[in-house]
Amino acid sequence: MAKFLIHGGKKLKGEIEVKGAKNAALKAFAASLLFQEPIVIKNVPLIEDIFRISELLEALSVKAEKIGDRTFKISGNQANSYVLKPEISKAIRASIVLTGPLLARFGKAIFPHPGGCVIGERPIDIFLDAFHEMGAKVAEKDGSYVLEAERLRGAEIVFKNISATATETLMMAAVLAKGKTILCNAACEPEIPYLANFLNVSGARISGAGTHTISIIGVKNLHSKKPFITMPDRIETGNFAVLAGLLGDNIIIKNCEPAHIMIFLKHLRLAGVNYEKGTNWLKISAPGRLQAVDIRTKEYPGFATDLQAPFTVLLTQAEGKSLVHETIFEGRLNYINDLNRMGASITICDPHRVIVEGPSSLRGRETESPDLRAGLAFVFAGLIAEGDSIIHNVYHIDRGYERIEERLQRLGADIRRIK
Ligand code: EPZ
C-alpha cells in the first residue's frame, strides 16, 4: 500500500490548477445508461473513484474508453445487465447513482448496499422510498436490493432529508418515466443543475434544478448531442484555499469557480485569510494572523461538509476557540483524535461538535487516512507540522484527488509517495 512521506514547515508558492469535479463526473458516467448512443465526457479527473465506476459499467458490458486527455467515451447504450457487481459497488457510494438509470432503462436493478467513505451510517431509505413512489417493487434477496418496475411512472416525491445523490438518482430515473415527477426538498448542489442542463440538451425536460423543487416530464429517449464538460471541483478549490491560507505566499488557484464556495470563502476571510477572485481564479494573500471562527456544515449553498476537515486543520492555527459543528454526517469528526496526537488542542463535545483551541504547534506523526476528505486534511496537517509525517492508506486520498503529491510538490511542498 502506498503512503505519503511529508516533511513539514515549507512555505508554498505558485499556481495550482483545479481538476474536474469527482461528484459531477461520476453522475455523468451513470447518466450514460439513459442514452441511445455513446456519450463523451471531458475534463474527467483521473482518480480511483472514476476507475471504479468505469469497472462497474464495464461489468454491465459498457465500454468506458479514454479517448483523449481526460476525455472518456462511454457506451452506456450497450449495457446488457442490470446487476451491479457487489465487490465494486461496496467500494464506492456513488454506485447508488447507477440504480436510477438502470431502473429507467431495464425496469430492474439489483445491487448491494453501497459502500464508500466511513463517515456515518449512509442509509439509502430515501432512494428506496422514492423508487417505491414511482411504482417500483422494492425487495431484498440474498443480501441485495431488487427493484422492479415495468416502466417507472411520474410521482410527487418528498425527500425527508436533503440528499445530493438521491436528488440526482431520482432526477435521472424520472427522465425516462411516464408522466411528470416533482422532487420536493431536493438538494441544490451545483453538480445537480449541471447534470440537468446536460440531460436537457440531450432531450430531457427538467426544470427547477438548483432549487428545492425540481420538475421532470418524462420523455421516450435521450440522444447524445454535446459532450459533458465536467465542472471544476469546488471541494478541491476550497482545499487549496485552506492550504494557501496556512502556508501560502500569494498562491493562485486556477480553473475554479469561486461562486460555488462563497460561504466557505466568507468563513476563510473571517478566519483572517484574504483573497481576490475572478470568475475562474482565486488568489490567496500571504496570511497574517489567523483567528478563531465557528463553522456549521450545511447543505449547499452552506458550508460544505466535505470542507470541514481541512478547515478544522486551519483552525488549529487560529488564535482563540472555534466551534466546529458537523450537521450532515455523524462520523465525519472521527479524525480529531489523530490531530490531537499531532499536538492540536481539540475537545470533542459529541459526535457532531468539537471545540478547537489555537494556535497549537503540530508535530509530525504516523497516521492513517480514514476517509477521502480527512485524508487530505492530514496531508495539510503534516505540511504545517514540525518534522516528518507518514500517512498510510493513501488509496483513500487517490479516490478523490488526482496525483495530489505531484501537484503539491510543484508549489514547493516536501511530500513523497512511497510504495
Ligand atoms: C454526497 O453524498 C456526496 N457524494 C458527498 O461527498 C457529500 O459529502 C454529500 O453529498 C453532502 O454534500 C457524492 O456525490 C457521491 P447525502 P450523499 O445523501 O449524497 C442522509 C465525498 O467526500 N441520508 O446528501 O451520499 C445521510 O445520512 C463525498 O466526495 C438519509 O438519511 O450524501 C446524511 O445525513 C462524501 N437517507 C444526509 O442525508 C438516505 O437515503 C446527506 O447525505 C440518504 C441520505
Image (cartoon, rainbow, N blue to C red):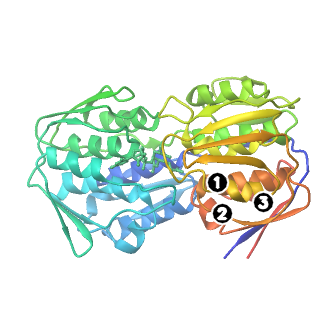
Judging by the rendered image, the residue that carries numbered circle 3 is 341
Residue tagged 1: 374
Q: Is residue 261 left or right of residue 385?
A: left
Gap in Å between the C-alphas at discs 2 and 3?
14 Å
- Disc 3: CA contacts within 10 A as few (<14), some (14-19) or many (>=20): some
Element assignment for label 3? helix
Q: Residue at x 58, y 58 (%)?
A: 46
Q: Residues within 10 Å of mark 2 (few under 14, many from 20)?
A: many
Q: Secondary structure at mark 2?
A: loop
**Image quadrant occupied by the C terminus:** bottom right
Q: Earlier in the sequence, mark 1 or mark 2?
A: 2
Rendering coords of residue 386 (x, y %) = 91, 56
Query: Horizontal and vertical percent for residue 230?
Result: 50, 43
**Residue 115 as seen in the image, left or right of residue 383:** left
Front residue of 103/347: it is 347
The residue depicted at 91 percent of the width and 50 percent of the height is 10
406, 210: nearer the viewer = 210
Residue nearer the viewer, 206 or 399? 399
Do residues under tags 1 and 2 come within 8 Å of each other at their CB atoms?
yes
Q: Amino acid at mark 2?
A: Ser
Amino acid type at circle 1 is Ala
- Asked if residue 346 lies left or right of residue 33, the reply is right
Give the number of the disc on residue 369: 2
